[in-house]
C-alpha cells in the first residue's frame, strides 16, 4: 500500500449493482455511502467478498467497516479493508 500515513477509520459502505462494469469484476460492488464521510460514492472499496454475497446480504445492505485510503501503482485511489476483519451490518434495504 502506497499511503502508509493514512489512518484506518470506520466507514459506512453499501452493496450495489454498477451501471457500467468496465474493468470491474463481479456483479455486486461496494461503495462508500453518500454524505457520511470524506469518501465519495465513486470510490471503489476492496473488502471481504461476504459483503457482496447476495446469499448472505441483499443488494443495498449497508455495512460499517474499518478501512483506509490507499492507491495503486497507476495512481487510482480506493478504500482498503482486510477480508479477515469483522464488519457490522448497519441496515438492510
Image (cartoon, rainbow, N blue to C red):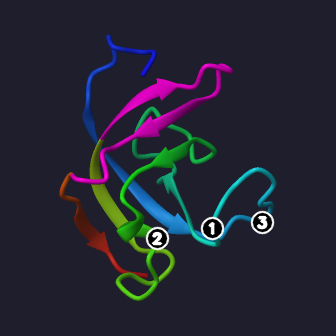
Query: Mark 2 and mark 3: span between their CA atoms?
Result: 16 Å
Number of disc labels: 3
Dot 3: what SS? loop
Task: Work out whether mark 3 precedes mark 1 in sequence or the reverse, and give the earlier one.
Answer: 3
Q: Point out the frontmost of discs 3 and 1.
A: 1
67 is higher (above) or lower (below) than 74: below
The quadrant the C terminus occupies is bottom left
**Which residue lies at the image location 49% right of the left edge and 67% below the top edge?**
15
Residue 3 placement (x, y as % from top left): 41, 15
Residue 39 placement (x, y as % from top left): 49, 36
Q: Mark 1 touching mark 2, by CB under 8 A?
A: yes
Q: Nearer the viewer, residue 5 or 48?
A: 48
Q: Which residues are magenta?
A: 67-84
Residue 52 is labelled as: 2
Residue 47 is labelled as: none
Query: Mark 1 and mark 2: span between their CA atoms?
Result: 9 Å
The quadrant the N terminus occupies is top left
Task: Work out whether mark 1 precedes mark 2 in sequence or the reverse, and give the earlier one.
Answer: 1
Q: Nearer the viewer, residue 38 or 88?
A: 88
Residue 26 is labelled as: 1
Residue 19 is labelled as: 3
Amino acid at each position: 500500500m502506497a499511503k502508509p500515513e493514512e489512518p484506518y477509520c470506520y466507514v459506512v459502505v453499501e452493496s450495489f449493482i454498477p451501471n457500467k462494469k468496465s474493468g470491474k469484476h463481479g456483479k455486486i460492488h461496494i461503495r462508500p455511502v453518500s454524505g457520511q464521510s470524506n469518501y465519495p460514492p465513486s470510490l471503489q472499496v476492496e473488502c471481504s467478498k461476504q459483503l457482496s454475497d447476495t446469499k448472505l446480504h441483499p443488494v443495498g445492505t449497508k455495512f460499517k467497516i474499518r478501512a483506509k485510503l490507499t492507491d495503486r501503482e497507476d495512481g487510482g485511489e480506493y478504500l482498503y479493508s482486510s477480508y479477515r476483519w469483522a464488519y457490522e451490518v448497519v441496515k438492510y434495504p
